[in-house]
Amino acid sequence: MAPKNKFTREEMAAAAVRVVQKLGAAALTAKSLAEELGTSTQPVFTCFGTMDTAKAEVYAAAERRLDEYLTAGLKEKIPFLGVGAQYIRFAREEPELYRFLFLIRVSEPENCAFAVMQHLQELVRPSLMGIYHINERDADRYFRDLWLVVHSLATLIVTGDCPYSDREIGQILTGFSVSICKAIKEIPGFTEGTFDRGSIFRGLIQEK
């Protein structure tokens, strides 16, 4: 009979999360997990069998942690801006979990960043339509484009390439929000991509 593990599965999964938070996903090994727990590697393999199982536990925990941030964003006065701000906050506060979720391919495509965007798009669509007085298609175009900016900024933060403060990021998102909203409302065919690009750009660059 195998010896009883003195750690619960939940305790060991939490320890695995801590290893990833501190050292990154690549550092999650039986040895590093055992060191975090202050034990030998035997309980690790007794619990998980393989490190792939341990990594799956960490991935699920990272998803739950992200969901906590996004849920908080959805409760803000302007939900579609709230989720963007919380997504960026998650990147700042949990960079290794963000990296594990979105910058290392360890999951099926339905769990990728694009799938997160589509899910949130459905949740924030009603507030977008109500606040900006736009239709469903316009709301989806607005959120998709804003999300691409948010995801880009979050990734730059995690990779250490973002020179902007939270205040500056807020200005970037506000400016983009104004621009995309004006384009949707004032340029016929913008959402569908059928507008006359040449005419619009000539009007923008024409000297007053």
Image: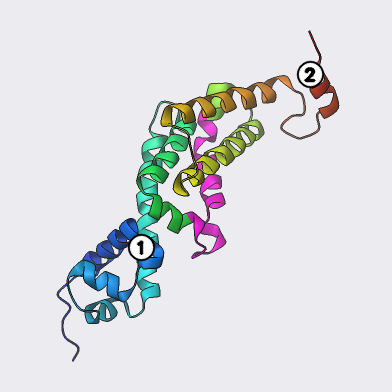
Q: Quadrant of residue 87?
A: top left
Q: Which residue is mark 1?
A: 58
Give amino acid for label 2: Ile
Q: Which residues are magenta?
A: 102-127
Q: Position of residue 193 (x, y in %)?
A: 77, 35
**Image point (41%, 42%), residue name:** 70
Q: Residues within 10 Å of mark 2 (few under 14, many from 20)?
A: few
| Quadrant for the N terminus in the image | bottom left
Q: From the viewer's perspective, is 106 left or right of 208?
A: left
Q: Which residue is mark 2?
A: 205
**Who is closer to the viewer here, 129 or 165?**
165
Where disc 2 sits, the SS reads helix
Q: Position of residue 76 (x, y in %)?
A: 39, 30
**Image point (34%, 60%), residue name:** 23
Q: Residues within 10 Å of mark 1 (few under 14, many from 20)?
A: many
Q: Residue furthest top?
A: 208
Q: How many marks?
A: 2
**Who is closer to the viewer here, 25 or 139?**
25
Give amino acid for label 1: Val
Q: From the viewer's perspective, is 190 left or right of 182?
A: right
Q: From the viewer's perspective, is 127 left or right of 184?
A: left
Q: Position of residue 166 (x, y in %)?
A: 42, 31
Q: Quadrant of residue 205?
A: top right
Q: Is residue 204 visible?
A: yes
Report, in whole angstroms, how far the alpha carbon at label 1 lies from the one at label 2: 51 Å
Label for residue 95?
none
Residue 154 included in the magenta stretch of the image: no
